[in-house]
Image: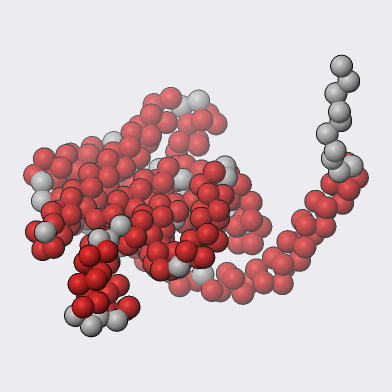
Amino acid sequence: MDWIEFPSLSRGTLRDMRIAIDGSFREFTRAYGETLEQAFEPLEDFLVFLEGLLIGSPWPIVLAVLVGIVYFMSRNVKITVSALAALALIGVFGMWEDTMRTIAMVVTSTLLAIILGIPIGILMARSDRAQGVVNPILDLMQTMPAFVYLIPVVMIFGLGKVPGLIAIVIYAIPPIIRLTNLGIRLVDPEVLEAADAFGSNGRQKLVNVQLPLALPTIMAGINQTIMMALAMVVVAALIGVKGLGQPVLNAIANQYFTMGVMNGLAIVGIAIIFDRATQAYGKRLQKHSEVVHG
């Protein structure tokens, strides 16, 4: 049986298309690369400031502040003691500075993802058309291999903190957008009808009713964004992002088993701390919401 040949473009046509697209992108980077770098300078300054604050401050103070934040969010002694033990072991094994760089990167990328993601999620919740446009983009962002994000940002910004930060945000932002949209859409219609009965306008319903009730779901999105940002740390090390990812890459290149495992466990420890603290905070918000609106 003869198979019908699948119609496809010729190799020459495909090559010409790739050359044209690559050339256009290079021209774009030459024309606007410097402008984009200047636009992202405040973000880089904040990241450098936070990193310097965590590394330059006395470690007992930084440790106390981090553990205090964990307790404030979780109100759980077991989680707090576990965080204290994990951070102390990280310091004892000489990974403190790399861990602080990683925390600074994750905190900055998460804050940026929240600032960008929550408004997009609100827009999706208020407009089915916007949801129809944004959802395929989010699907693409979540299924695209992480390494692909590095290509355009490196072409525009080169190596360093800013391209790594942008790549991490692109990779990690979908959960906060999706769960903000979901949380607002799941608000009980009867609650919204009651708000209408009291004469609330759209902005008042959003700020005073929808967002407070959706906050536990939004916190779940923030939790997932933090986890994805941590997962991207090792990949971002390929373009010069300092932190726990670089020793892992060095261990792979030089076959240093112990170095790789120790730094990998440090990333796992930080991930567990973030995960448990944000989950506990989300549960507290949910209980508070049920008490107030129950």
Q: Quadrant of the C terminus?
A: bottom left
Q: How many marks?
A: 0
Q: Is residue 118 above or below residue 86?
A: below
Residue 182 at what x, y percent from top left?
36, 56
**Residue at 41%, 46% in the rendered image:** 228
Choose top left, top right, bottom left or bottom right for residue 247: top left
Residue 20 at what x, y percent from top left?
82, 57
Residue 245 at what x, y percent from top left?
45, 42
Choose top left, top right, bottom left or bottom right for residue 286: bottom left
- The scheme the figure's colours follow is secondary structure
143 to the left or right of 27? left
Residue 108 visible? The answer is no
**Residue at 31%, 42% in the rendered image:** 271
226 to the left or right of 18? left
Residue 228 visible? The answer is yes
Q: Quadrant of the N terminus?
A: top right
Identify which residue, 49 or 265, lies in the foreground: 265
231 to the left or right of 80? right
27 to the left or right of 265? right
Q: Is residue 166 above or below residue 193?
A: above
Identify which residue, 205 or 69, lies in the foreground: 205
Identify which residue, 145 or 70, lies in the foreground: 145
**Residue at 50%, 37% in the rendered image:** 249
**Residue at 57%, 45% in the rendered image:** 144
Residue 53 at what x, y percent from top left?
30, 62
